[in-house]
Amino acid sequence: MPQLLIELLCEEIPARMQANAARDFERLMRERLADEGLLPEAMKAFAGPRRLTLVAEGLPAVQPDRHEDRKGPRVGAPDAAMDGFLRSTGLTREQLVERDGVWFAHLHRAGRPVPAIAAEALDSVIRGFPWPKSMISGTSKLRWVRPLKRILFLFDGEVVPFEVEDIASGDLTIGHRFMGSRQVLKVRDFDSYQDALAANFVVLDPEERKERIMDAARTICFARNLELVEDDGLLDEVAGLAEWPTPVMGDMDPDFLDLPPEVIRTSMRVHQRYFAVRDPRSGFLAPHFITVANIEATDGGTTIARGNAKVLSARLSDARFFWNEDLRVRLADRAAKLKGVTFHAKLGTMHDRVERIVALTERLAPFVRDDEETLVHAATAARLAKADLVSGMVGEFPELQGVMGAYYAEKEGQDPEVVDAIRHHYRPQGPADSTPVQSAAATVALADKLDTLVSFFSINEKPTGSKDPYALRRSALGVIRILLDTRTRLPLGQFVSEELVAFLGDRLKVLLRDQGQKPDLVDAVFALGDDDLVRVVAKVGALEKFVGSDDGANLLAGFKRAVNILRAEEKKGALPHGAPVDMAGAPGEETSLINALGHVEIELDKALEREDYASAMAVLSTLRAPVDAFFDKVLVNSEVAAERENRLRLLLQVRDAMKRVADFGQVVS
């Protein structure tokens, strides 16, 4: 079947926009074609420094005819309604069909050539493309990320007539800006297009560019007994900066290695887009770097490496200046300057925030580890943790906050636990980031995140839909992960509002769902009002195994049957109270359930006391047989009032016993 091929060539597209641009191009074209009943067998978009490309396979040459029965007004409707319906359909009253008192219009639309439909779709996509930032160039009215230069537009090997703002479509493209042929390249289909680009030093696929960078960089390092410090984020960026990426190793002044390695790597990464290199034997950084050029230099990259080394030396000289100047001021003295730094207009200064974190730390410390040393170290770290925000180094490299504070604290001779807490108090910053291990670090990290949540909820700055400008969902997941990883038994209700407990519960559901557990089980446990997340997770794990067993599934069905009966009686105001009485002459199944409940209450007390939830579930499972027998043999709604009340009390006792572990009514069977 015919192939659709589109290339939009322009000036340099920022690397950070390319991945989303490819996704948006594919999504928007797919949606526009689908609106016309066209579903390609395959579609893929590519983005690079100067071009957006899309290829679609399996489209027909002509759109299939379409038929639609459109419902109109009822027979006898006002003339205005009928006239409007006729105008929308383009039919006359005589052409309508009446069915069941309603007028219907049968619309037949002959299929159109797919190239014409694709041209309309592309025009809509180009004019409405969701670039984060765009510009208007010259006299054109078109907004595009950078000036649009050329459009390649082919269907089944033929040029699709198309024009946007005086740029007409064709079957031509161009290669690399410097290394490629100066002639335009004529193409017929995607294969010839990709081959022509490759022959002219353009790697179309960003994933292929990444592989090219990594393979060459590792090879260069291996040849010199070195190891590349891999960085996925940096790799994504440099792959978007070069159409023909060519890694080159450069040398840096080894005297700079006395700077903290994070400073060297950040300076390389942020300012120059260099990869760091290390000695695989020692694990320390080596005095070299990898830069990614966009050309194959005739001298093997010597001149490129030399020029980049000079620029890096200048950057690292600045970093050394900041380092030396920052060491002149103690963190405690620097912390006072936070009074002049606004945290949020409604939440005061950063100094105010530090005071809140210190107070929270002192309250949290006994729950994390109940000893005086942890409290002292955590409180000290909390007071100093934000001081590096007013340092020269963090002013230049904001991503080093916390890291630099730890180095400055270490130079001052602070206790190693204080240093560790300052370094790690921002953790975890994402799902791949580890949680703090040491007690003081975990305490300060918890305080930092809880203050963020409490503060922004207090001024009604809460996440809404996909918007979360203050990363509160991330803070909540950080709190949860720290509590679970450190096994901290924290009664959240003593530290946050009910609304925030619920918010943390929702985030816990997300975390457990990602681990393969059902959200309804979390709801079943949270419904009891338990705000100890360690205990909640233990209950959820035991509950999952229980409801997955035959005994659990059958008892759950019995529980729901009992609850339905009780709910009906409650609506009638006929629900009895008190414990059931073992009446003489009661059926054996009723007596058996009374006895079983007495045993369960005793054993359940023991299991819950030692927080052995697996045993608690096992105890509940012993109710399965007597509950099944009770419902099978005993009539709850007995005509004898005393019997009926006794049996309803029995069902209440079954419900209440099970609700001591979880609200089984929340479990989706």
Image: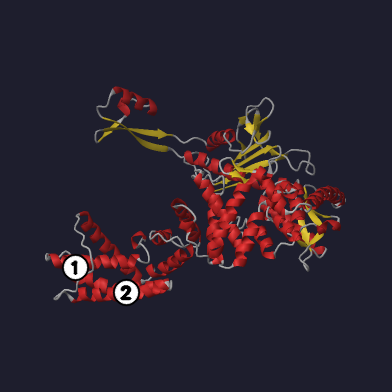
**Badge 1 is on which residue?**
646
Residue farthest to the left? 639
Examine the rendered structure and indicate whether residue 177 appears above or below residue 231: above
Examine the rendered structure and indicate whether residue 459 appears above or below residue 93: below
Between discs 2 and 1, the one toward the N terminus: 2
Is 98 or 178 nearer to us in this picture?
178
3D distance between C-alphas at marks 2 and 1: 19 Å
Examine the rendered structure and indicate whether residue 108 appears above or below residue 379: above
Q: Callout 2: helix, strand or loop?
A: helix
CB atoms of marks 2 and 1 within 8 Å: no
Q: Position of residue 4 (x, y in %)?
A: 59, 42
Local packing at callout 2 (Cα closer than 10 Å; few below 14, some 14-19, many 20+) is many
Q: Position of residue 319 (x, y in %)?
A: 79, 50
The picture quadrant where one finds residue 525 is bottom left
Q: Is residue 197 left or right of residue 449?
A: right
Q: Residue 207, which numbered label? A: none
Examine the rendered structure and indicate whether residue 481 appears above or below residue 356: below
Q: Where's the C terminus, which quadrant? A: bottom left
Q: Amino acid at mark 2?
A: Val
Residue located 68% across and 45% down the image: 15
Is any part of residue 438 visible from this angle? no
Q: Is residue 605 left or right of residue 275?
A: left
Is 554 or 568 nearer to us in this picture?
568
Q: Position of residue 212 (x, y in %)?
A: 73, 55
Is 289 or 154 nearer to us in this picture?
289
Q: Position of residue 324 (x, y in %)?
A: 81, 52
**Badge 2 is on which residue?**
600
Is 149 or 190 nearer to us in this picture?
149
Q: Amino acid at mark 1?
A: Asn
Is any part of residue 536 visible from this angle? yes
Residue located 39% across and 28% down the image: 88
